[in-house]
Image (cartoon, grey):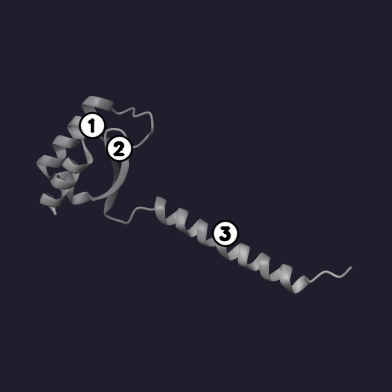
Amino acid sequence: MAFKLPGILNRKKALRRSLSGIKEAALKSTTIPKGYFAVYVGEDQKKRYLVPLSYLNEPAFQELLSMAEEEFGYEHPMGRLTIPCREDVFIDLTSILS
């Protein structure tokens, strides 16, 4: 019985390439560009948004942060900044700010 090593080696290389692509995609989804921070928005399903740091100076955005503080305090169970408003409201506000 003969084994075809070149075929096995090619499959291993292809598998390694696909796994490295998965790792790169995972890193890209968790990294945040300089000058931005992540917030999670939504009532039932939370969606992640990257927000420029400059929004922290905007009174309307500060109001959203105050709402988050009232609802969650500083001890959010998921360990992330969550804005307690509807996603469409958040999108409308950020489009006005940008």
Crowding near the residue tagged with mark 1, few <14, some 14–19, many ≥20 C-alpha atoms within 10 Å: some
Residue that mark 1 sits on = 68
Q: Position of residue 95 (x, y in %)?
A: 14, 51
Outermost residue toward the bottom in this view: 6
Distance of label 3 from label 2 (alpha carbons): 31 Å
The number of callouts visible is 3
Give the number of the disc on residue 81: 2
Q: Quadrant of the N terminus?
A: bottom right
Say what amino acid the circle numbered 3 marks. Answer: Leu
Q: Residue at x 67, y 65 (%)?
A: 12
User: In terms of image quadrants, where is residue 39?
Assistant: top left
User: In terms of image quadrants, where is residue 25?
Assistant: bottom left
Crowding near the residue tagged with mark 3, few <14, some 14–19, many ≥20 C-alpha atoms within 10 Å: few
Q: Do the residues labelled 2 and 1 touch (CB within 8 Å)?
A: yes
Residue that mark 3 sits on = 19
Q: In this view, does 72 lie above or below 51?
A: above
